[in-house]
Image (cartoon, rainbow, N blue to C red):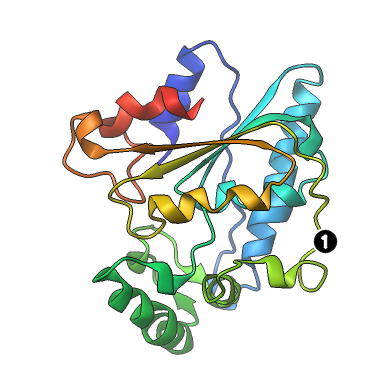
């Protein structure tokens, strides 16, 4: 999914680490959570990059989940800039009409029922190849059912983040036709990084010469005209 973007970044003269989150052979039997992906796996990727380049400027480019978990990372103070694309406190009730109707059904009926019947959320609901473990969906549902995302869980089921660590540039990117994380929600990620220096940009499909981008296509080649804004 991100390979074309990663190749473009490398062509600009940057070293880049592209990683995947952990999976289990059978997602129906998995206990993986969103915190496993967003805290443990992201932290491992960041630590690996720092080990490889101990004196080099570190920039993190995160999409969706990749943008709203950096406050938990042990070496967040080594990050020079964080680009959070299509990322923010995705409270389902803030989904624009008429998509809010589908969002309500997904989080409260379809998602829980699919997990109960099959043991995991089928990938077709998210446009992915792999199912999402029920344990990950349950935590994700909890976060998206709260206007403050995962803040109520800080110091409880999630670690208490050190909000003084990341002091770099916070590059917030919203996409005008992203109804899952609309631009106003993407902008509301800034208070989660109170020590950072935030800037916010909205990009449009027309500017990229394409009909749509939405939540998933910013890193696809058809949106490549926007890629310089992500660095």
> How far across and down, in percent of the image, does residue 210 sit?
18, 35
Which residue does the image show at 69% across and 47% down from the upper left?
193
Q: Tag 1's secondary structure?
A: loop
> How far across and down, in percent of the image, does residue 84 sit?
54, 42
Q: Can residue 69 be seen in this view?
A: no
Q: In which quarter of the image is residue 166?
A: top right
Q: Name the residue under label 1.
A: 160
> How far across and down, in percent of the image, does residue 92 sit?
44, 72
Is 51 drawn above or below residue 19 in the view shown? above
> How far across and down, in percent of the image, does residue 47 sit?
77, 36
Which residue does the image show at 46% across and 85% down from the upper left?
112
Identify which residue, 52 or 102, lies in the foreground: 102
Which residue does the image show at 83% across and 68% down from the upper left?
155
Going by the image, does 148 lie left or right of 144?
Answer: right
Going by the image, does 17 lie left or right of 106?
Answer: right
Which residue does the image show at 28% across and 44% down from the upper left?
213
Which image quarter is the N terminus in? top left
Q: Residues within 10 Å of mark 1 (few under 14, many from 20)?
A: few
Identify which residue, 4 or 102, lies in the foreground: 102
């Amino acid at each position: 999914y991100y390979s074309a973007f990663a190749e473009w970044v490398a062509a600009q003269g940057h070293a880049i680490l592209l990683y995947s989150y952990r999976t289990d052979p059978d997602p129906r039997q998995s206990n993986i959570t969103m915190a496993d992906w967003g805290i443990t796996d992201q932290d491992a990727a960041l630590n690996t990059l720092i080990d490889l380049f101990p004196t080099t400027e570190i920039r993190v480019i995160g999409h969706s989940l990749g943008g709203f978990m950096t406050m938990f990372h042990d070496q967040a103070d080594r990050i020079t800039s964080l680009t959070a694309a299509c990322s923010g406190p995705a409270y389902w009730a803030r989904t624009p009409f008429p998509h809010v109707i589908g969002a309500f059904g997904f989080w409260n009926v379809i998602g829980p029922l699919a997990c109960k019947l099959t043991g995991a959320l089928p990938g077709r609901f998210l446009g992915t190849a792999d199912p999402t473990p029920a344990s990950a969906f349950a935590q994700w549902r909890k976060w998206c059912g709260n206007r403050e995302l995962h803040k109520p869980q800080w110091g409880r089921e999630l670690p208490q983040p050190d909000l003084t660590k990341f002091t770099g540039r916070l590059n917030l990117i919203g996409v005008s036709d992203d109804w899952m994380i609309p631009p106003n929600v993407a902008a509301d990620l800034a208070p989660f990084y109170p020590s950072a220096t935030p800037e916010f940009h909205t990009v449009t499909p027309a500017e990229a010469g394409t009909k749509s981008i939405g939540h998933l296509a910013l890193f696809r080649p058809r949106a490549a005209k926007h890629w310089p804004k992500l660095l």
